[in-house]
Amino acid sequence: MSPVGVGVIGVGAWGKNHVRVFSELEEVTLAGIADRDVQRAKSYAQQFNTTHYTSVEELLKQDDVDAVTICTPTVTHADLALQAIDFGKHLLLEKPMTDTAQQAQRVIDAAKSANTTLMVGFVERFNPSVETAAQIIDDEKIGELVLGSARRLGPFVPGRVADIGIIKDMAIHDIDIARFLAKQEATSVYAIAGQLYHKYEDHANLVIRFNDKPTFFLECNWLTPQKMRGMNITGSQGVISLDYISQEVTLGTSQQIKKSTSQWDEPLKRELSHFIKCVAEKQNPITSGSDGLEALRVAEAALKSARTKNIIYLEEFRIN
């Protein structure tokens, strides 16, 4: 397989990790990076032996750029994605894929018409602990899936995100995991959210229902001093506890308590390797544009629920 030429758009707090990982993948040529911060772009270009561009259009014009990842502020995602598609580039959009569900649908339609690969950056889907939990559920080792409870807590990192609140930025990870594990679409959401120190909500609790079951409780904030990432899953015949950070999974049934012993593996590297394979082999990504859209719909419904203090039923919730 010939190396895939990749450009990274936005090399801030998260985009810089894309640059690092792509530089480590043998099946990739890091063809360029684009960032409006000239000094930052130059610095990373020199460090990783590639070309820097302060104009996204200049990067997209390059013939050796087959695909791009977009790691810029959320409000810019839709316009940049449509521009990349116009240039015939395959793309990975970091979550949330766009600022609104309506924009997400436009991007999906454009990528389909252009026959370009569109993947959404839900990095936790590539966390080995999530894959292990999903396999346990599929093997019916805990019986029927009844309940999930996730906590995604930690301090706010200045400069990392400034254009959205915690529901679209952080809770959306666990919204996607809930959909993935439930293997169905959410039917309703109820949320309580508030803001203590930020322009947008910085703490939230969501209750998401999937028909009569399962139900998922999601807690997230930018207030907790220590970073916490985990989920507890209850079935009719057992429980699963997973830690996204250590990647440890514990299975508890009436017969045994068993902990996973697999070696730690970087989720971002697994995610970006999958993206490159999809581009090279014309495969459908595990985390598709539709996944990004549905998670965004639930996040928007949660924000409406928090504003109105009502349960929002997804069947009645329309893309505005």
Image (cartoon, rainbow, N blue to C red):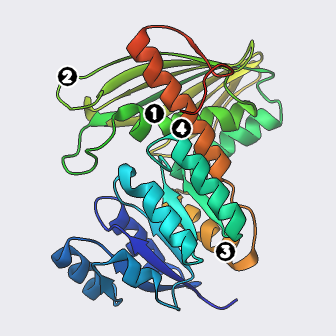
Tell me whether the residue at label 3 lies in contact with that at label 2, contact meaning CB atoms closer than 8 angstroms. Answer: no
Front-lying residue, 106 or 62: 106
Circles 3 and 1, Cβ within 8 Å, touching? The answer is no
Residue 124 horizontal/vertical position (percent): 54, 47
Residue at x 69% of width, y 79% of height: 280
Give the residue pinned by disc 2.
196
Task: Tally the marks.
Answer: 4
Q: Position of residue 49 (x, y in %)?
A: 34, 90
4 or 3: tag closer to the N-terminus = 3
Cα separation between marks 4 and 3:
24 Å
* Label 1: which secondary element: helix
Quarter of the rendering containing residue 90: bottom right
Can the viewer see residue 160 in this picture?
yes
Tell me the kind of residue under disc 3.
Val
The picture quadrant where one finds residue 70 is: bottom left
Real-space CA distance between mark 1 and mark 4, rounded to the nearest whole angstrom = 10 Å
Name the residue that disc number 4 marks: 296
Q: Is residue 260 visible?
A: no
* Residue at 46%, 80% in the rendered image: 60
Residue 244 horizontal/vertical position (percent) = 49, 42
Kind of residue sitting beneath label 1? Ala
Q: In the rendered image of this protein, does residue 109 appear above or below residue 26?
A: above
- The extreme top residue here reads 310
- Residue 294 position, x and y percent, is 62, 38
Q: Which residue is mark 3?
A: 279
Label 3 residue SS: helix
Between marks 3 and 2, how big is the CA–CA gap? 43 Å
What residue is at 62 percent from the left and 32 percent from the top?
A: 178
Q: Amino acid at mark 4?
A: Leu
